[in-house]
Image: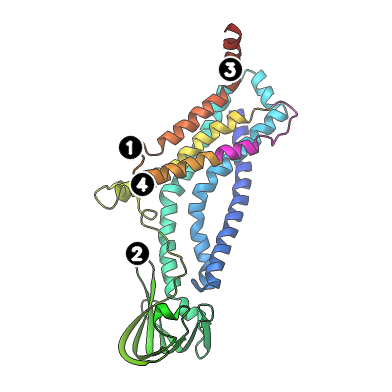
Amino acid sequence: MIIRRYFNRELIYTSLGIIGILLVIFIGHSSLKYLKYVLRGVFPVSYIVEMVILEIPYLLSLLIPLGFYLSAIMVYSRMYAEHEMIIWLTSGVSRIRLLFLSLSSSIMVCLCVAVFSIWLGPLSISYLKNVRTVAKSDVISKLLSPGQFSLVDGGKKVIYVDNFTKEADGSNTAHGIFIAEHPRNPRKTGYDFEIILAKNAKVMSEEKTEVQYAILNEGYRYSNTQDTFRSIKFDSYMAKLPDFNTTFDYTENIMSVDELLDIQVGSSKQKMAEFHWRIAHPISVIVLILIAFSISRIEPRRGRYSRVLPGILLYIGYYNLLFFGRNAIREGTIDIVFGLWWVHSILFVLGIALFNSKRIIKYIRIIKKTS
């Protein structure tokens, strides 16, 4: 009981510190990503905080296994370097018992990761999709100031709006619209400049592709080429807004487990790839703690952090195999029955081999001598 409490306390405190540092780094990365979108006119700045917060549950499903794994390597290496592990072993506590204590302490972490990976992560991404849809539909009213001319699309387009009104569904309708555009490629568009006047306009977005369109009502469209000038009166005119390359794929990411396992709806390969990817995170906690315990054995008074870099390389290899396996399931290269179990099996066998590395090396030497 004393050993278990000692192990749990060390692992939990170190894990919380590492996970906190990793979370701050990834939140900063997400914030910079959304700031780039804001500067390009994709999202209003007022939505950044909400979107970053909604990404945290999914980030935690990835960062908790990594943080727990790194903390285990650091704690066990320190115990070997400072003779603590030697004291436990000489006191009659076997390495196998210590390993099982480590595995038992990882059960709660495994369950926590499962909650984030299987339930909270997809739920937060579903809310994130809705927020992004609202943000993209609201971008015109946020970027344009009523009563002022505004340059958009790299200065190729000038837009003027008299005012905005809020609709019952939360969207904004613009009134008194003036749009002047000088296209980047006149040969492709067929005109040198274009002017649009409209009574009102509203932004809409396609649900699947998230391509945005402006629906302009009751207006005129003027355009010219080198030898012609055209004037068109319209009751309703649909114009595609600039494509900022921000199409997000949420098809399987937001599905519940029941929907993923329902093979009668949608692509079974895509859904099973997502299902195996979700359960891979909690399973990886068990596999990684075995590897961490196995590679942390160092000689006393040696560098306590010397095993961190090899551990990170093993983690990178592990998750690269998971990424490869997920894509292979989607493409049909790997059968959905095998899923990602082969990746976990390879790393689990590697962990067992590392755990018994001294014994294996001893047997190899004996075989060489006898031969």
Q: Is residue 343 above or below residue 260?
A: above
Q: Considering the numbered disc 1 on the image, is that residue within a helix, a strand or a loop?
A: loop
| Helix, strand or loop status at disc 2 | loop
How packed is label 1: few (under 14 Cα within 10 Å), some, or many (20 or more)?
few
Q: Are marks 4 and 3 in contact (CB under 8 Å)?
A: no
The amino acid at mark 1 is Val
Q: Which sits earlier in the primary sequence, circle 2 or circle 4? A: 2
Label 4: which residue? 331
Q: Residues within 10 Å of mark 2 (few under 14, many from 20)?
A: few
Identify the residue at horizontal 53%, vertical 89% (top origin): 148
Would residue 129 be visible to someone looking at this image? yes
Neighbour tally class for label 3: few under 14, some 14-19, many 20 plus, Cα within 10 Å: few
Give whichever of 119, 250 is nearer the camera. Answer: 250
Which residue is labeled 2 in the image? 208
How many angstroms separate mark 4 from mark 3 (CA)? 41 Å
Q: CA distance from mark 3 to mark 1?
A: 35 Å
In primary-sequence order, the first of circles 4 and 3 is: 4
State which region is magenta. Answer: 299-315
First-in-chain label (2 vs 1): 2
Mark identifier at residue 245: none
Residue 195 horizontal/vertical position (percent): 42, 89
Name which of mark 3 and mark 2 comes first in the sequence: 2
Q: CA distance from mark 2 to mark 4?
A: 21 Å
Residue 359's disc number: 3
In the picture, measured across the screen, residue 339 lies left or right of residue 6, that is left
Cα distance in 3D space between marks 2 and 1: 29 Å
Q: Amino acid at mark 3?
A: Arg
Identify the residue under disc 1: 337
Type of amino acid at the residue the image marks with label 2: Lys
In this view, the residue in front, 140 or 121, is 140
Q: How dense is the environment of label 4, judged by Cα within 10 Å: few (below 14), some, or many (20 and up)? A: few
